[in-house]
Amino acid sequence: MIETRPSPGKPTAIAKRRALLLCILLASGCHAGSERFASTPISASQPKKPTIKAPARPLVSLVGFREDDQSKGGESGRVGVGENNDTNSIDSKMAISDLRAANLPTPLLPISVTSPRPDLLPELIATALSTHPSIAAARQRVAAAQHRIPQATALEDPMVGNTFWPIHDQALQTAGGRVAHQFALTQKLPWPAKLDARGAVAAREVQVALAEIADKESEIVEAVRLAYYELWLASELIRIVDDNNELVQDLITVAEARYKTGGSQQDILRAELEGDRLAQQLISLRRQQEQARADLGTLVRMPLDYMPTAVTDLDVDEAVPQLDLLVAQAERCNPTLRGLAAEIARDRAKESLACLQQYPDFQLGLGYSIISDNQDVISPVANGHDNINFTVGVTLPIWRDKINAGVSEAAHNRSSTTLRQEAERDRLRGTLRRQVASAYAAIEQHKLFRERLIPRTEQTLEITTADYQGKKADFTDLIATYRELLSLQVQVARTEATLASTLAGIERTVGCQ
């Protein structure tokens, strides 16, 4: 099971790149560019957030969480710049003071915002399990199946009858007198083992219904997990786009500084175009985020204005599935296999019941006749004494073809269910093998991205930025390196979401927590 928990704020790589760019600008003598860099406005709606970097740490937090720690990290990055250049810090403060004195808008500074508590995945799963109507419907089917047991094991209703002759001269005559009424009470009694066999069939139907509950619960849990991971992925990509938007602003600053020393204005326009591309991606990502929220809200049956938020880390770094162990757990816990096992037991009970049809059923009866001797009595010795009689009946199971056909039908049904169970077991093994292979591939990709590709690409971006400022590289190389870093960051988030979704699928296939 994947645990989700918030993680403390982590320092960003953007602050380091900002410090490096500022040092480059100051070393090249572009004081105006450094002032702009030091006082770059930061939108209050897009607080400064960390990027994906350290390989030994889990993924970074989402937008809107740990903003107080993140804003502190952003402020510490700015303090570091000021400590590296006291003159530049004083100039920035004086510039802001001059703007305030002239009643001009001042740059927005980072504001510490108290973030709402994120929705924890176990709480959402518990809510879905307790409120989802499909699970409640499955539970009602179990209750209905349980009420079929006393019906199957009960005797048929007894029969009460009355035979009477309203016309006296046409009534049945005996030596004791004329029969006025003849009452009869009869009860059918099946062969003793048949009732137990019927109860066993009904009890196995309850087990089948219970397996359907477990399967439906597993389905809902997987759906909640997948919707939650989709929400996390959309929020994480939004955070990455926000961070790269700040990086694009740094690229614009560098391009403007290069333009003042004889560079091309085309570099500035290309950098601004990258910012427009990020804005386009942000629109699509926000749409995906709202769709994930809608799916999650539907599963937990929340109001339309419910705005769930994901935690910062999925914590899947230590997830290493073992195929043999998973297969053994699936054969023991998978709801479909459990349901098929209950169906096999039910079919065996039906086969036993079919075999019992070769034994007879019984019928017992009690009769009471009212004898009259006062009118139209033919017998001279009529005394009017009432009669009591008993009847015993038994069925004759002589149609062997019908009985044998019933036994063969039950046997074929049992064989069919057994083969279905074997097919389902083979399917689960193949599915688990594919899922484990996907999980291992995602783990290796995630490790490669975090430990090698992203750190090297960040280093390459810093070197390329320095070369571009020193006129040793063109802006095309700088943009290409930036795009590669953005692509790797997106791939890291998608890989982690894919790994989490794969593990959720494995848990659904296995059926055990």
Image: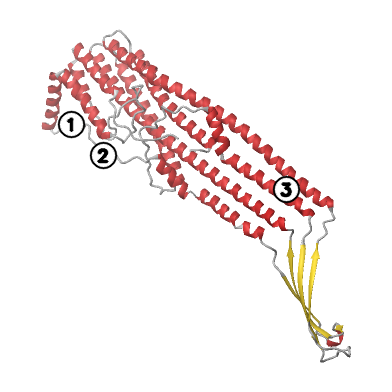
What's under tag 1, amino acid-wise? Thr
Residue located 30% across and 15% down the image: 462
Residue 363: mark in rendering = none
The local secondary structure at tag 2 comes to: loop
Residue type pointed to by label 2: Thr
**Position of 253 relative to 1 (above/below):** above
Of the pair 240 and 225, the residue shown nearer to us: 225
Q: Residues within 10 Å of mark 3 (few under 14, many from 20)?
A: many
Q: Could you say which quadrant of the image residue 387 lies in?
A: bottom right
Residue displayed at 71% across by 40% down: 415
Q: In terms of sequence position, does the residue under pointer 1 or pointer 3 come before the other?
A: 1
Residue 370 appears left or right of 470 = right
Q: Position of residue 105 (x, y in %)?
A: 18, 32
Q: Nearer the viewer, residue 300 or 377?
A: 377
Crowd tier of the residue under label 2, counting other residues whose Cα lies within 10 Å: few below 14, some 14–19, many 20 or above:
few
Q: Position of residue 80 (x, y in %)?
A: 19, 22
Nearest-to-viewer mark from 1 and 2: 2
Q: Which residue position holds label 3?
A: 351
Q: Earlier in the sequence, mark 1 or mark 2?
A: 1
Q: Residue at x 41, y 41 (%)?
A: 122
Is there any visible trace of residue 41 in the rendered image?
no
Display colour scheme: secondary structure
Q: Which residue is mark 2?
A: 114
Against 119, is 455 above or below?
above
Residue 394, horizontal then vertical, whole percent: 80, 63
For the residues labelled 1 and 2, the Cα–Cα distance comes to: 23 Å
Q: Looking at the picture, which amino acid does disc 3 mark?
A: Glu
**Mark 2 to mark 3 CA distance (whole Å):** 67 Å
